[in-house]
Amino acid sequence: MIKLDEIQKRLLSEVAGLHKVPEGAFNIRSNSESIGRASSANIEIIPREGGDGLEIHIKPGTKNESVHIPVVMTKTGLKEVVYNDFYIGEDSDVFIVAGCGIDNCGPQDSEHDGIHRFYVGKNAKMKYVEKHYGSGDGSGKRILNPGTELYLEEGSVAELEMVQIKGVDDTDRVTTAELAAGAKLTVRERLMTHGSQRAISKYVVNLNGAGATADVVSRSVARDESYQKFDAVLNGNAPCSGHTECDSIIMDKGRILAVPGLEANDVDAALVHEAAIGKIAGDQLIKLMTLGLTEQEAEEQIINGFLK
């Protein structure tokens, strides 16, 4: 039986939507140790050699199953690098929930660097949700540096939802993808920074096969004196289509940098980048304030809707 204290339960709820032990395959990691693990008939979770992470093997043809691999940290001063490798069999369709929550009430920085590698077989589909959350009133930082590598075989589909809304002081996210013929990648990133927080997101997508497609979209809000950078590179190496978009709200003394990178190496590679950075429109605030909201309440309503 997994025993969790109230802080651990809150963190798991925030990053993985878990209020109890999940059904199916899962691994729950707390303060650098696995505190619960289970495989299913079609999904096997085993430790990597060296003990620095996990291997997750999903049998070909597996449908409508899930894997939960959340991480929580409640001790100040912890720093770890964890590697998780996913082998997703042909013609499967799976839902994967990751994410990390750090509650740091002490004076030392706490850091989790999670490196996830996905090998997606032919005609397989996966949806991957990764949420990051920080809390605690200590002076130590909450640092998360996720790395995601995707290797999509012919006809495979990967949908990524990356969310970081609250409490993470510093993050440097790097996502790379290699797409074979007919493969499809969709990324939806939602991000909010405040205080003096810093968030860097870098995507490098190589469209290597005919008919490969990628759609990478980031929506973000930078408040107070926080800083964000969105750096998206698409390399069209075959007849393919790719789209990146950065749509951001800037507030207070926040700073946002959007860096597009498009490289067409084939005459039939169609690549597009869009970027829009601006403050909340005054007419939106006025409209909500006429309905009885204060200016602060109106701002929160607009931000919540924007980041949904």
Image (cartoon, rainbow, N blue to C red):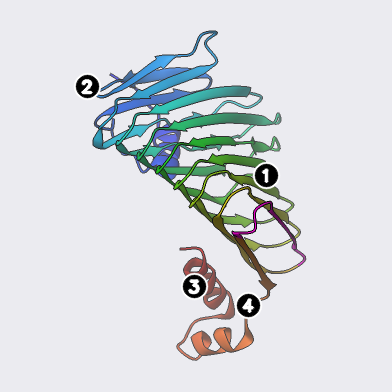
Query: What amino acid does circle 3 point to?
Result: Gln
In front here: 269 or 134? 269
First to last magenta residue range: 253-269
- Identify the residue at horizontal 69%, vertical 37% (top origin): 141
Label 4 vs 1, first from the N-terminus: 1
Mark 3, residue position: 301
Helix, strand or loop under label 3: helix
Helix, strand or loop under label 2: loop
Say above or below: 251 vs 25: below
Residue 220 in view of the camera: no
Seen as rendered, the residue at the extreme front is: 267
Query: What amino acid does circle 4 point to?
Result: Ile
Quarter holding the C terminus is: bottom left
Label 3 vs 2, first from the N-terminus: 2
Mark 1, residue position: 169
- The mark found on residue 280 in the picture is 4
**In the rendered structure, does residue 151 fall within the stretch colored magenta?**
no
Q: Is residue 167 left or right of residue 301?
A: right
How packed mark 1 is, by other alpha carbons closer than 10 Å (few <14, some 14-19, many 20 or more), is many
Of badges 4 and 1, nearer the viewer stands 4
Label 2 vs 4, first from the N-terminus: 2
Helix, strand or loop under label 1: loop
Quarter holding the N terminus is: top left
- The mark found on residue 29 in the picture is none
Query: What amino acid does circle 2 point to?
Result: Ala
How packed mark 4 is, by other alpha carbons closer than 10 Å (few <14, some 14-19, many 20 or more), is some
- Identify the residue at horizontal 72%, vertical 62% (top origin): 224
- The mark found on residue 41 in the picture is 2
Circles 3, 1 touching at the beta carbon (< 8 Å)? no
- Identify the residue at horizontal 53%, vertical 45% (top origin): 209
Disc 3/disc 4 C-alpha distance (Å): 11 Å
